[in-house]
């Protein structure tokens, strides 16, 4: 296993744990956090690929990571706003009980 | 593969697993901060100092705090403690395991060696000048995105009497 | 007269315009809507006559094409054409349509949705006429779809009746199955020939260049491309023209108002499939490298037609509903048209199409008149003796029945059916379709006689205050006349009957073997010469015998059964005319001969009766059991295999829909799981065998 | 990204339409907050929406007159005839959505609502004009975040919240997959430019396979292809009508274009083939499978719906399947067919939502069972609805039919000898035959069935619906016009195409 593969494996594991959290938690906030972890996993990929890339003078990977962190923050803000507002309406953020739309 | 990497990796995986598995949401967010810190350390180790610092500022400083606020706001009223895991959580877990096996298999079966050249840490000046040159368009876009997200979040979360009658 | 080619497009445009205007009229403006539809149809008829005259003077296809849009490096052109085929159909559709429009004003008089009815009817006529004039398969398909759409709307016109709603659904879906093949064939043709125009001064898809290219290219199973595409398009024709096994919708479609049945499901729309095959006949009959005289496509057409012809005829024998008998008979006759196309070419098939359109419209309108007169009753067992109450209807219906049965020499149906049988007899592939068609012809005469016996002869069996089984919307009308006697329909309904009856007679003389004007016109050569071909007279004789035998058998069987059930005084006359006549003469004319002749006649009668009962009756009974058994089996197959298969497959589609809708269970994390699972599945699919 | 220094003037010239929109957005919000404080809600929403549409019109006029051309930094931002056309189409659809919003009273934050719609439009305009992963990602997120918020704007409805939350969680996860895929693409090519990535990819490697599937997930979510469609029925049903129409229309145009570019340029080295029985692994069979699943699932589930909006959602899934057919063909002709299809589809969908929003304002329901009487009560509206639905069903001579026809012909002509996509075309035609059935159910309800009560026959006009009414008629006219003269859109499209490929 090369160094790059180790980083990729770590990011895959992080991605999968985030996914597992998003798929299993009832609390909508923790589902959102799981998604944030998945975004972080992608960032690890970017930095690792940049680090092991042919020329580190091209900082594309670094820039992509910076931008994706900003995007993730904005997403978290919007997501938490939606969750809080939904709670104010229905007094729950339990995803299992949110099933009135179906079919 | 260095020892430091191993330590950081174990830290990240352990704290992430805890963040996704603990019962109390507040504890989850606290362990999550450890994860974010670990990832920042990973970035530092790889020579991307600025990204590491951004990571700490944005995730630990903003996202985690926001999440704590949100958890407190959504749990006080009825004192209702949510059941931790949803129905069919096992299926979700198995799905995640399957995704990981596929990803892991792909990573391990492809020999991506990478070039282990001498790493020149990227300087803040370099990043700043790139942001003003090659990356000026994404920068503008991010600005718009943050504006839109800010206004949207405020409108949504704003509580007005006539809105929630 | 070439100006007419440019303005042929007005013929469908006028009814469509009328439909558009009447769609915007309020529901209560009944007279304007009907007037608009009839005037537009009359104008179209006049134009169609002009077009016909133009086609007479110049029988080669005249086209008006225009480039419609640029697509890639190709131009997609649309256009219309005028050739004998178009001209004949135009005149037929506008004329029959006009008559039916007029008839409808009487039939639908009491319907609250009168205006909408005429809107749909005019839209339908426009679509149908569009199919006829189209010089592009694309334009044809567009109009074809409009026709299908309006057919759906009209069958389901009395949507309160759940059977009508179900029938509309069934018609729609069944024809769509056929259209599926049509569309694939069309796209394939476009991909191969790069044009969808039929005639385009040498470059059209039906002209020698493209056809010869398509005919030499072979695809799977040694099928030539032209045959393969032709067969796909034939799927569409099968759906529209009710060929087995896509016929299921046609009998059910009788739930619509009777004028609709007459116009759509007897005269025009169902004929569109036959017309389509006649239109693309050059494609269907294109020879490959090795010359097989009947191409595979035409052989399939013939066999499907033969099966349909026999099938429809046998099923019709076992029906009680007056319109369903006619519906199955339509199925059967469409089969004949297909046989005609397959074995004899467009002229033979189209001739039967035209004559059939007239006499079947006549029969349907006559049936409508009967139903109207009997206050919505459709069961022939509860009719009887109507010829007294509705003499005009009876007369015209009788003519229609003779035409359909192929009564020798005088009616049009005889000549057109004879032409088909003759061609089938000389088909080089097999004699079997000929025998199937002959048997079908026998049965046709048989069941039509049976129906007429039931409806018009005997005593009135209409229950005075019985429940009205059919939900005709004119319930007020029902209350008015329900308790009283059946009544003759108003003149606005009987006049079209009389006109149609005239044509049911007269049209036949356009295509007799002695003077085959129709055939030569359609084939484009003007040598109106009598053809003396071998076996012509023999076939004519055979088909005469078949028709007469059928009528005779029908009379024999159903005359007898009615005696047993009815005690009316004129039963005997109807059942055994010879015996009765003999008795009558003896009784009535001279008492002197009483002692001798009456006794003798009585003995004769008794003998005849005995013979009849034990010998002749036995034979007839055996035949009838055979026929009825066959009919029952067919009916069974139709109801429980074809229909059931259809219904259950529809149900399973619906079930599948429900099962898939169940995926949408409302829990977001289940949805998120599907993303993960899809990722795993797709990646595994991609990596299977790669990562080694 | 290469290190060529960008000239700001070049960037400026290419991004002026977007800037006009941003300026209009801020202006609309500030006018709403400052000048219109005392005005009634309907005045405010009409004023801001019309201001927003004027901004869009100005941006479109700029594009139409100036024809901004250029190529910034090797594909970061492009301008050519094709992109100009797409941008004008997107702006036109946005104007339609804004006019639909002009009559709405579901929120008090009308200025912010218009601002977010315009921000999302800016995201779309960038999305179709770029061939760079980073810009694609950020633009998609700008679009998505605006759409999440727009979907949650109705504060009165609990369903609206639930749908918005589900939409957000689904979208967030798709974005995570998309970003993961992008990171792998970056790793494989060390570049974010699509053409560079295409040049680095030779054959299918395991990581590339994951990247392809992740991209399919992320963009499959945006275009609502099965099995990434689960958010769509809820959003279509519960979101405010303008939001739902916006999500169903303009967003789809942009997403399909970027999907097409990513697949055909970025994955050029790993095409594969979807010939029946001879699948070769690559991105084409993946898209083909998603397309087939979408067609089948969308059409069959739509049969069972009783809410017209949900029905539209499932039919949208089916339409996404048809449009993915154009991706699998990936020829210039199929791109033209795709654009024609998605634009006419969007117009018809916005129209259907416009009709539904008026009907809902009157009756409070969008169920098929509550439609009877519409044709007597609102003859013009129900006629427009008929045109939109028949166009969606692909009935000639409406625009939807020609969209389908071109699409299928283009798919078959991608290689006329072997016709590898014949099975998919046959499936598309077969399932679209099913689709006509459920569209007709809606039409039958509004046209033929008589209502239970006579109350359904009396017109209950609600104030503030004049603009949506006009919009319905305009869109219906557009659908008919584009169907009768497809060259109106096709000729400029085809003229613009050669410069892309």
Image: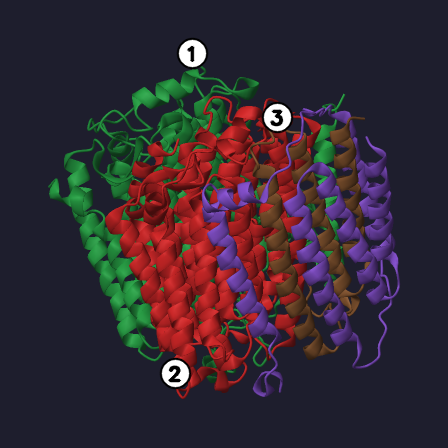
Chain colours: A brown, B purple, C green, D red
CA distance for labels 2 and 3: 58 Å
Kindly identify which chain the residue marked by label 2 belongs to. D
Task: Name the front one of labels 1 and 3.
Answer: 3
Instruction: State the SS at label 2.
Output: loop
Instruction: State the SS at label 3.
Output: loop
Give the quarter of the figure containing the C terminus of chain D.
top left
Q: Nearer the viewer, residue D488 or D412?
A: D488
Q: Among all residues in the image, which is located at the extreme top?
A: C290
Instruction: State the SS at label 1.
Output: loop
Residue at mark 2: D36
Q: Are marks 1 and 2 in contact (CB under 8 Å)?
A: no
Residue at mark 3: A54
Q: Is residue D172 left or right of residue C147?
A: right
Q: Is residue B74 left or right of residue D442?
A: right
Picture disc at residue C289: 1
Image spot of residue C496 (x, y percent)? 31, 62
Picture residue at 61% right of the left edge, 81% below the top:
B159
Kindly identify which chain the residue marked by label 3 belongs to. A
Picture disc at residue C157: none
Q: Is residue C238 left or right of residue C99?
A: right
CA distance for labels 1 and 2: 81 Å
Residue C585 visible somewhere in the drawing = no
Task: Name the front one of labels 2 and 3.
Answer: 3
Q: Residues within 10 Å of mark 2 (few under 14, many from 20)?
A: some
Kindly identify which chain the residue marked by label 1 belongs to. C
């Amino acid at each position: 296993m090369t160094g790059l593969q180790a980083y990729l494996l770590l990011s895959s594991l992080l991605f999968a744990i985030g996914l597992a959290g998003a798929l299993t938690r009832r609390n909508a906030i923790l589902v959102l956090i799981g998604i944030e972890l998945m975004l972080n996993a992608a960032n690890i990929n970017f930095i690792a690929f940049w680090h092991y890339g042919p020329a580190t003078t091209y900082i594309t990977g670094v820039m992509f990571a910076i931008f994706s962190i900003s995007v993730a923050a904005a997403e978290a803000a919007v997501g938490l706003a939606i969750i809080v507002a939904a709670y104010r309406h229905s007094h729950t953020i339990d995803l299992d009980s949110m099933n009135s739309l179906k079919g | 593969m260095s020892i430091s990497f191993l330590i950081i990796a174990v830290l990240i995986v352990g704290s992430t697993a805890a963040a996704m598995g603990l019962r109390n949401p507040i504890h989850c967010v606290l362990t999550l901060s450890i994860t974010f810190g670990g990832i920042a350390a990973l970035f530092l180790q790889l020579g991307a100092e600025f990204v590491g610092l951004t990571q700490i500022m944005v995730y630990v400083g903003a996202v985690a705090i926001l999440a704590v606020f949100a958890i407190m706001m959504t749990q006080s009223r009825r004192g209702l403690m949510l059941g931790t895991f949803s129905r069919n959580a096992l299926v979700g877990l198995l799905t995640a395991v399957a995704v990981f096996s596929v990803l892991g298999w792909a990573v391990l079966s492809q020999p991506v060696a990478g070039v282990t050249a001498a790493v020149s840490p990227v300087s803040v000046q370099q990043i700043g000048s790139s942001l003003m040159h090659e990356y000026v368009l994404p920068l503008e876009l991010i600005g718009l995105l943050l504006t839109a997200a800010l206004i949207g979040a405020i409108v949504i979360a704003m509580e007005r009497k006539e809105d929630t009658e | 007269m070439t100006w007419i080619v440019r303005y042929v497009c007005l013929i469908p445009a006028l009814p469509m315009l009328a439909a558009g205007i009447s769609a915007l009229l309020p529901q209560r403006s009944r007279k304007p809507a009907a007037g608009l539809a009839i005037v537009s149809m009359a104008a179209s008829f006049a134009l169609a006559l002009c077009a016909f005259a133009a086609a007479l003077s110049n029988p080669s296809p005249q086209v008006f094409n225009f480039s419609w849009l640029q697509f890639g490096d190709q131009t997609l052109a649309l256009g219309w054409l005028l050739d004998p085929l178009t001209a004949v159909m135009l005149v037929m559709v506008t004329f029959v349509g006009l008559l039916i429009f007029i008839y409808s004003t009487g039939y639908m008089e009491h319907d609250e949705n009168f205006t909408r009815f005429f809107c749909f009817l005019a839209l339908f006529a426009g679509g149908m006429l569009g199919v006829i004039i189209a010089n592009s398969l694309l334009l044809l398909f567009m109009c074809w779809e409009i026709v299908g759409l309006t057919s759906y709307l009209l069958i389901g016109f009395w949507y309160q009746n759940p059977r009508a709603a179900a029938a509309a659904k069934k018609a729609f879906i069944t024809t769509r199955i056929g259209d599926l093949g049509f569309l694939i064939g069309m796209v394939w043709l476009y991909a191969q020939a790069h044009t969808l125009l039929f005639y385009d001064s040498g470059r059209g898809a039906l002209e020698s260049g493209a056809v010869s290219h398509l005919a030499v290219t072979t695809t799977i199973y040694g099928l030539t491309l032209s045959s393969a595409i032709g067969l796909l398009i034939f799927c569409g024709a099968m759906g529209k023209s009710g060929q087995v096994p896509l016929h299921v919708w046609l009998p059910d479609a009788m739930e619509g108002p009777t004028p609709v049945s007459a116009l759509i499901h007897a005269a025009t729309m169902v004929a569109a499939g036959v017309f389509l095959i006649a239109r693309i006949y050059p494609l269907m009959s294109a020879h490959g490298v090795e010359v097989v005289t009947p191409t595979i496509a035409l052989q399939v057409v013939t066999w499907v037609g033969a099966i349909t012809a026999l099938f429809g005829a046998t099923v019709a024998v076992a029906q009680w509903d007056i319109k369903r008998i006619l519906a199955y008979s339509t199925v059967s006759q469409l089969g004949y048209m297909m046989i005609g196309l397959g074995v004899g070419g467009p002229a033979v098939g189209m001739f039967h199409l035209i004559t059939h359109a007239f006499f079947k419209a006549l029969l349907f309108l006559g049936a409508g008149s009967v139903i109207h007169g009997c206050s919505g009753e459709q069961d022939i067992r509860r009719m009887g003796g109507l010829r007294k109450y509705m003499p005009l209807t009876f007369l015209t219906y009788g003519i229609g029945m003779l035409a359909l049965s192929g009564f020798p020499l005088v009616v049009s149906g005889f000549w057109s059916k004879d032409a088909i049988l003759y061609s089938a007899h000389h088909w080089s592939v097999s004699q079997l379709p000929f025998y199937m068609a002959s048997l079908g012809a026998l049965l046709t005469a048989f069941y039509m006689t049976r129906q007429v016996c039931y409806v018009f002869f005997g005593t009135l069996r209409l229950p005075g205050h019985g429940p009205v089984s059919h939900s005709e919307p004119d319930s007020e009308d029902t209350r008015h006349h329900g308790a009283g006697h059946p009544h003759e329909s108003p003149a606005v309904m009987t006049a079209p009957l009389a006109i149609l009856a005239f044509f049911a007679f007269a049209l036949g003389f356009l295509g007799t073997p002695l003077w085959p004007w129709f055939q030569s016109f359609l084939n484009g050569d003007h040598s109106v010469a009598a053809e003396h071909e071998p076996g012509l007279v023999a076939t004519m004789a055979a088909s005469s015998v078949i028709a007469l035998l059928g009528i005779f058998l029908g009379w024999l069987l159903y005359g007898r059964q009615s005696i047993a059930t009815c005690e009316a005084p004129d039963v005997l006359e109807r059942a055994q005319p010879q015996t009765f006549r003999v008795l009558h003469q003896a009784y009535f004319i001279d008492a002197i001969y009483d002692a001798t002749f009456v006794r003798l006649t009585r003995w004769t009668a008794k003998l005849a009766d005995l013979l009849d009962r034990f010998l002749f009756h036995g034979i007839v009974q055996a035949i009838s059991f055979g026929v009825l058994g066959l009919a029952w089996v067919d009916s069974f197959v139709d109801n429980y295999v074809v229909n059931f298969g259809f219904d259950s497959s529809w149900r399973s589609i619906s079930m599948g829909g429900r099962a898939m809708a169940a995926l949408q269970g409302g829990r977001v994390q289940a949805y998120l799981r599907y993303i993960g699972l899809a990722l795993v599945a797709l990646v595994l699919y991609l990596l299977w065998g790669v990562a080694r | 990204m290469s290190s060529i220094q960008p000239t700001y003037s070049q960037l400026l010239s290419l991004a002026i339409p977007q800037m006009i929109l941003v300026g209009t957005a801020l202006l609309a919000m500030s006018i709403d907050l400052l000048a219109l404080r005392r005005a009634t809600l309907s005045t405010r929403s009409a004023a801001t929406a019309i201001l927003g549409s004027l901004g869009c019109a100005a941006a479109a006029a700029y594009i139409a007159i100036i024809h901004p051309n250029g190529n910034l930094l090797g594909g970061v931002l492009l301008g050519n005839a094709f992109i100009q056309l797409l941008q004008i189409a997107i702006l036109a659809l946005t104007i339609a959505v804004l006019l639909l919003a002009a009559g709405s009273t579901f929120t008090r934050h009308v200025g912010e609502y218009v601002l977010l719609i315009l921000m999302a439009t800016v995201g779309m305009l960038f999305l179709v004009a770029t061939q760079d992963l980073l810009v694609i990602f950020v633009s998609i997120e700008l679009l998505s975040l605006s759409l999440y918020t727009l979907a949650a704007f109705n504060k009165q409805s609990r369903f609206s919240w639930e749908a918005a939350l589900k939409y957000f969680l689904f979208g967030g996860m798709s974005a995570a997959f998309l970003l993961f895929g992008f990171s792998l693409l970056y790793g494989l090519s060390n570049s974010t430019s699509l053409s560079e990535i295409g040049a680095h990819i030779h054959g299918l490697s395991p990581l590339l396979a994951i990247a392809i599937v992740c991209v399919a997930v992320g963009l499959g979510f945006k275009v609502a292809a099965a099995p990434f469609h689960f958010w769509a029925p809820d959003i279509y049903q519960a979101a405010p009508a303008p939001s739902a129409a916006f999500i169903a229309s303009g967003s789809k145009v942009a997403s399909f274009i970027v999907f097409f570019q990513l697949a055909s340029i970025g994955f050029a080295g790993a095409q594969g083939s979807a010939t029946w029985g001879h699948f070769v692994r690559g991105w084409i069979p993946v898209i083909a499978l998603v397309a087939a699943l979408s067609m089948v699932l969308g059409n069959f589930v739509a049969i069972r719906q009783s809410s017209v909006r949900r029905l539209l959602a499932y039919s949208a899934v089916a339409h996404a399947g048809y449009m993915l057919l154009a991706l699998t063909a990936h020829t210039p002709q199929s791109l033209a067919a795709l654009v024609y299809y998605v634009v006419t589809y969007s117009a018809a969908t916005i129209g259907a939502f416009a009709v539904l929003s008026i009907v809902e304002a009157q009756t409070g329901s969008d169920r098929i069972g509550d439609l009877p009487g519409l044709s007597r009560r609102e003859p013009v509206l129900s006629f427009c609805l008929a045109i939109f639905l028949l166009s969606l069903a692909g009935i000639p001579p409406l625009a939807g039919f020609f969209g389908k026809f071109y699409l299928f012909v283009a798919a078959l002509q991608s290689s006329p000898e072997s016709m590898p996509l014949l099975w998919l075309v046959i499936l598309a035609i077969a399932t679209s035959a099913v689709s006509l059935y459920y569209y007709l159910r809606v039409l039958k309800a509004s046209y033929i069935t008589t209502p239970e009560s006579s109350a359904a026959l009396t017109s209950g006009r609600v104030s503030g619906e004049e603009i949506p009414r006009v919009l319905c008629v305009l869109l219906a006219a557009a659908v008919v016009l584009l169907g009768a003269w497809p060259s109106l859109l096709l000729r400029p499209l085809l003229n613009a195409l050669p410069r892309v490929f």
